[in-house]
Amino acid sequence: MTEFVHPTILFFAGALVIPFLSGMVRKLWLLLIPALAVVVVAISHSGSYGAVRFLGQELLIARVDKLSLVFATVFTIMALISMIYALHLKRPGQHVAAFLYVGSALGVVFAGDYLTLFVFWEGMAFASSYLIFAAGGEKSMQAGFRYLMVHLTGGIALLGGVILHGAATGSVLFGPIEGPLGAAAYLILIGFTLNAAVPPLNAWLTDAYPEATVTGAVFLSAFTTKTAVYVLARGFPGTELLVWFGTAMAIYGVIYAVMENDCRRLLAYHIVSQVGYMVAGIGIGTEMAVNGATSHAFAHILYKALLFMGAGAVIYVTGRRKLTELGGLYRTMPLTVTLYMIGAFAISAFPFFSGFVTKSMVVSAAGYDHRAAVMLLLTLASSGTFLHTGLKLPYYMFFGRDCGLRPPEPPRNMLIAMSIAAALCIGIGVYPAPLYALLPYEVDYHPYTWAHVSESLGILMFTALGFVLFLKALDPEDTISIDTDWFYRKGARAFMRFAEKPFARYEQAVSSVSEKTLLPFMHRSAQLGLRADLGVIDAVVNGVARKVLRNGERLRRVQTGIVTHYALGMVAGVIAAITIFAVVWL
């Protein structure tokens, strides 16, 4: 029996078939492939598979262990849910791109060496960018281009680090970086943290995700940043720098969410914040912290996708995404409101929802590691998450001022997908044992203690009170928040101005000098060369040729073909040679 079938093969092969299918057959195919992948991952056995040698290096296509399996499990589950959400799409382009995106993410998760990881890493960048371009429009095209350029830049940094690492160690096998971080490790870390959206390398996320298609944003929210969390957990556990990067992320995302008016951009900033918990947990590096980071990645994929599905459903039926243009939708979209709020309670770490049993593990790990400042800041960030994702966004999107719209509920497949994700958010929160059993280390953590529950409810209720008291101050405004993307946007414009003005003028000056001075000189030189060729070189060559022909003609006459003539010539030659020798000798 085969112990391991790489799920990437299923998604890549499935993507090739999609364009040739239509109607119900295509829909069944779109559900069959991720369902098979869920089964394949569930029955996989730990081990190393696909060891080969390439260019003198040992490569390992797939390494299966508890860390890779927990991420592969949630990736395949999320692929199935997302495909259900996207079943109503008529054109196959997004389905193909999504299959390639998921397959590449799974390739990263199982990669046992850096070269295999890099190939799938770049595959994710190209496949996911299509989900942004597919939205059409100038903003989506520009955002997609920036997204792709940023990720290719990160890929170059990653590749540079891999080359230096291979040269220094003689191996490109992927594992924990040991010892002090050198140039190779820092380049690899830059490549990884860029995909994790660690500030200041985070602006690509909040720039691109809101411009993606309704269904594409759901896929984007699930895979890119979480593959980065996986590779950080695999390669850099216990790296002190990540503790502070992650803590800063958690606060950074919450602060920027305060200023957001675009519902999906607000959710995108909370991706930055929530991934911060995972990065901080990996940096702490204890077994409990890594378990917390891993379990929170699992829960986050589900509840964040649910939130993006809820916001996407609103955009799908209204065509609007700004909070200042929405409100009063609860009247005709009660199911969407309910399902969204389940995701909001999960991300806010309410008891009996998934975030409560995963996020608190990271915070507790910080406390057990005697990091009081980190623990306090992560707790504050959790309060801010409830304020914006659990209160502000649903209030202004579904309640608040009536915008006058009466849209229907979204298509049934969207509601089914949201319902599955909501059920998992509640199921994990009520009974976390199956998730804890998947984690890389044995779990000795009990979230449902009286102290933990009362403390969490106290923080959440205090946050809700603050929201009610300061509601007017939280009113969304139709403004644009300046993030770190300002630097490369301005930098690109400055470069284009330099290319269009100073550099273009320099090029014109060089062309003018060339046309007025160099080209006439070259023309005259060419004419003189032609005359020298015809008058001197050709005359010499032709004269030599004629001389050779005349001598040849004379020699031909000597050759009579009579043997006696040849004999007399030979005798005369011998006599001449003897005479010359005698003269010289004497």
Image (cartoon, rainbow, N blue to C red):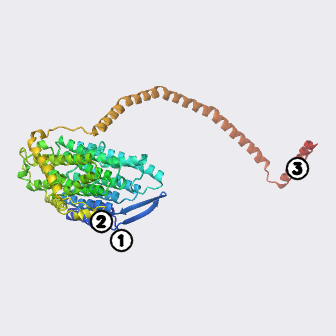
What secondary structure is marked by label 3?
A: helix
Query: Which of the marked residues, 3 or 2, is nearer the chain's N terminus?
Result: 2
What secondary structure is marked by label 1?
A: loop
Nearest the viewer among 495 and 483 is 483
Nearest the viewer among 415 and 473 is 473
> Residue 169: horizontal and vertical position, in percent?
47, 53
Do the CB atoms of the residues marked 3 and 1 lie less than 8 Å apart?
Answer: no
Residue drawn at (44%, 28%), measured in percent from left and top?
A: 510
Res. 574 mark? 3
Seen in the image, is 573 located left or right of residue 486? right
The disc labelled 2 sits on which kind of residue? Answer: Val
> Can see residue 33?
no
Q: Which residue is mark 2?
A: 41
The disc labelled 3 sits on which kind of residue? Answer: Val
Are there few (<14), some (14-19), or many (20+) residues within 10 Å of tag 1?
few
Q: Which residue is mark 1?
A: 2
Residue drawn at (11%, 55%), measured in percent from left and top?
A: 338
Do the CB atoms of the residues marked 1 and 2 lie less than 8 Å apart?
Answer: no
